[in-house]
């Protein structure tokens, strides 16, 4: 069993989604953010910093001219347009076509650290998905945003965040 990071669990709880509602790119965004915070900023993943940069929307498939909810990959995590320049460049694949056939989920495993699989369809996006950081909380992010700018100036990119994970994890 693969343990899940408590930040991922917190995001799933906050957005009220299950793992199957995410796409591979979303999981990559989340993993890169955790790596950025822990490996480069030296902090636990910061929820307000996440909400400062990212928003979530609902993706539906067009079938017969109608928008239809889909059971897998129905959410879309993306950088807020106005803040994307402040975040590290992430080169994500433009098509994950066929990923559904490779996906699996362990059902009803009481020892699993993930939320229980329900197969629930998400019909409408929650209003909270689009919320960013409240103005009063932005001032607490200034040091982190400055540190992030220094990383960008030193050439750190999204690929650099994920490389240690792909090689087997951080070495402390």
Image (tube, rainbow, N blue to C red):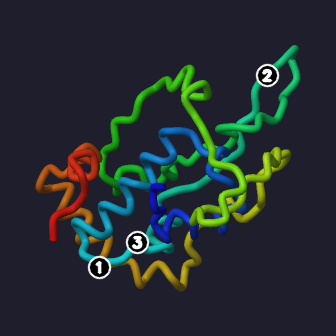
* Disc 2 and disc 1 in contact, CB within 8 angstroms: no
Residue sitting at x 79%, y 46%: 119
Crowding around mark 3 (Cα neighbors within 10 Å: few <14, some 14 to 19, many 20+) is many
Crowding around mark 1 (Cα neighbors within 10 Å: few <14, some 14 to 19, many 20+) is few
Where disc 2 sits, the SS reads: strand
The image shows residue 62 at horizontal and vertical percentages of: 79, 22
Residue sitting at x 29%, y 79%: 143
Say whether residue 122 is left or right of residue 41. right
- Please tell me whether residue 8 is drawn above or below residue 81 in the rendered image: below
How far apart marks 2 and 1 lie (CA) works out to 43 Å
Where disc 1 sits, the SS reads: helix
Say whether residue 170 is left or right of residue 141. left
Residue sitting at x 56%, y 21%: 98
The image shows residue 169 at horizontal and vertical percentages of: 25, 57
Crowding around mark 2 (Cα neighbors within 10 Å: few <14, some 14 to 19, many 20+) is few
Q: In the rendered structure, which disc, 3 or 2, sits on the residue that comes first in sequence?
A: 3
Residue nearer the viewer, 123 or 116:
116
**Of the two numbered discs 3 and 1 in the rendering, the one whose residue sits closer to the viewer:** 3
* Disc 3 and disc 1 in contact, CB within 8 angstroms: no
- Please tell me whether residue 44 is drawn above or below residue 60 in the rendered image: below
The image shows residue 158 at horizontal and vertical percentages of: 29, 47
- Extreme-top residue of the structure: 64
- Which residue does the numbered mark 1 point to in the structure image? 143
Where disc 3 sits, the SS reads: loop
Q: In the rendered structure, which disc, 3 or 1, sits on the residue that comes first in sequence?
A: 3
Dividing the picture into quadrants, the one containing residue 102 is top right
Query: Which disc number belongs to residue 61?
Result: none
Query: Which disc number belongs to residue 45?
Result: 3
Query: Which disc number belongs to residue 62?
Result: 2
């Amino acid at each position: 069993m693969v343990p899940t990071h408590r930040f991922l669990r917190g995001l799933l709880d906050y957005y009220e989604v299950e793992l199957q509602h995410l796409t591979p790119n979303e999981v990559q965004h989340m993993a890169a953010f955790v790596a950025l915070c822990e490996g480069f900023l030296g902090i636990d993943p910061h929820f307000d910093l996440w909400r400062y940069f990212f928003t979530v929307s609902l993706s539906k498939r067009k079938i017969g001219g109608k928008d239809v909810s889909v059971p897998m990959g129905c959410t879309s995590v993306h950088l807020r347009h106005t803040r994307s320049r402040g975040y590290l460049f992430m080169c994500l694949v433009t098509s994950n076509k066929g990923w559904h056939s490779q996906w699996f989920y362990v059902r009803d495993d009481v020892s699993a650290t993930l939320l229980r699989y329900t197969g629930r369809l998400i019909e409408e996006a929650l209003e909270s998905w689009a919320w960013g950081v409240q103005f009063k909380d932005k001032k607490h992010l200034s040091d982190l945003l400055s540190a992030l700018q220094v990383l960008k100036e030193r050439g750190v990119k999204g690929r650099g965040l994920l490389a240690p994970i792909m090689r087997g994890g951080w070495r402390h």
